[in-house]
Image (tube, rainbow, N blue to C red):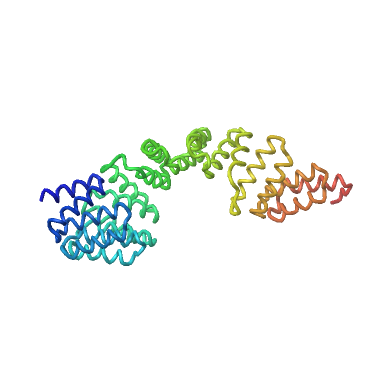
Amino acid sequence: MADLETIRALFSSGRHQDCIQACQTALQSNPHEATAFKYAGKSLLALGQIEQAQNLLIKAHQLDSQDPETAKDIGNCLLSAGKHEEAANAYLKALEIDPEYAPAINNLGGIAQQRGQHEEALRLFLKAHSLDSSLIQASLGAAQSAIAIGSWDIAIRCCDQALKSNEGQPGTNLLKGIALQNKGEAVEALRAYENERNINPAAADAYVNASIIHLQMGNPQGCSDVLTRLLAFKPDHNNGRLILAQAEQKLGRWEEAVKNYQSAAFDENVNAMIPFNLGLCLLELKRDQDAFHAFTHATTRDPNLAAAWGNIGNHLKNSGDLQRALDAYRRVLGIDPNNGMALDAIADIRRQEGKTDE
């Protein structure tokens, strides 16, 4: 019995190689010791040796068919191998042994969540938590599925349950912040994101989400401060750079805004407002030709962006290219027939051409 207690202690402390060695020693004394097969399999699973783990766990289950944990761990092996349907069947087998075995219910919730069945996943996670309130993964899984279906209050409650079990659990405050942010409780969301950053300073989403709130609250300096911290350790965070560029633009720091817009990679699906805003900043810096190219880029992303066509028209008009300017202004009027700027500009061009009636 002492050997089996040692085996359990080695596994619990994460000393998996030592645990496997202890299991082998125990099996030399008793080749039919189910617990030794079980913990050797569990340690191999923890080490990522899935096939060997599954073989030992199956042997343990054959020796002790009334242990729901072994059936659950066989399911974990199958899940790791991508065999979701077989894994679900193994978890159901664990529940045939013990209908209230919370880890198996939790894992069935995880499979439902992966399939996008969030209402079913939420039901399973909540049931698992009701059976074992210390099962923090059930609370977190429930929060994720609640967020997916827009049940913000349930998500917040589940996060609070998880924090009660472990206030230092990474990711919990992030989920709570997302739910609070979507519920419209901006100040509380900021507090949750700050808590997440204190626990996990590398939690990029906590910085980005907080920066968006600052921007929406009319606090571009707060947005800039948060994202400067993010980019200090993750300088290639594209979304962070784009949001920082918007904050710098609102602060009138045109050089910094342009630098961040240009540092961010523009992919084929880029929002047209990104090159458009870059163009506005370049205009402030009197870099008219660069601004013209940025506005042109914006119209390739969104041909119906009237403001971009207007700025293209202005550049062409100022450059003396009146015919192309007229074409650009007409594009504006095709989108917005009552656009006063375009009508005034066309009238001015006709005046310069001596066509006063037009």
Vertical comparison of 348 with 26: above or below: above
In the rendered image, the residue lying farthest to the right is 354
Q: In front here: 42 or 22?
A: 22
In the figure, residue 53 lies in which quadrant?
bottom left
Vertical comparison of 345 with 118: above or below: above
Q: In front here: 106 or 85?
A: 85
Q: Residue at x 32, y 42 (%)?
A: 169
Q: In front here: 85 or 321?
A: 85
In the rendered image, the residue lying farthest to the front is 28
Query: Percent x, y for residue 193?
Result: 40, 40
Q: Residue at x 11, y 48 (%)?
A: 2
Q: Residue at x 64, y 42 (%)?
A: 278
Query: Percent x, y for residue 226?
Result: 48, 35
Q: Residue at x 34, y 59 (%)?
A: 80
Query: Percent x, y for residue 84?
Result: 34, 64
Q: How many marks?
A: 0
In the figure, residue 241 lies in which quadrant?
top right
Vertical comparison of 200 with 51: above or below: above
Query: Percent x, y for residue 348?
Result: 81, 44
**In this rendering, would 257 be left or right of 157?**
right
In the figure, residue 74 lies in which quadrant?
bottom left
Q: In front here: 353 or 358?
A: 353
**In this rendering, would 93 be left or right of 345?**
left
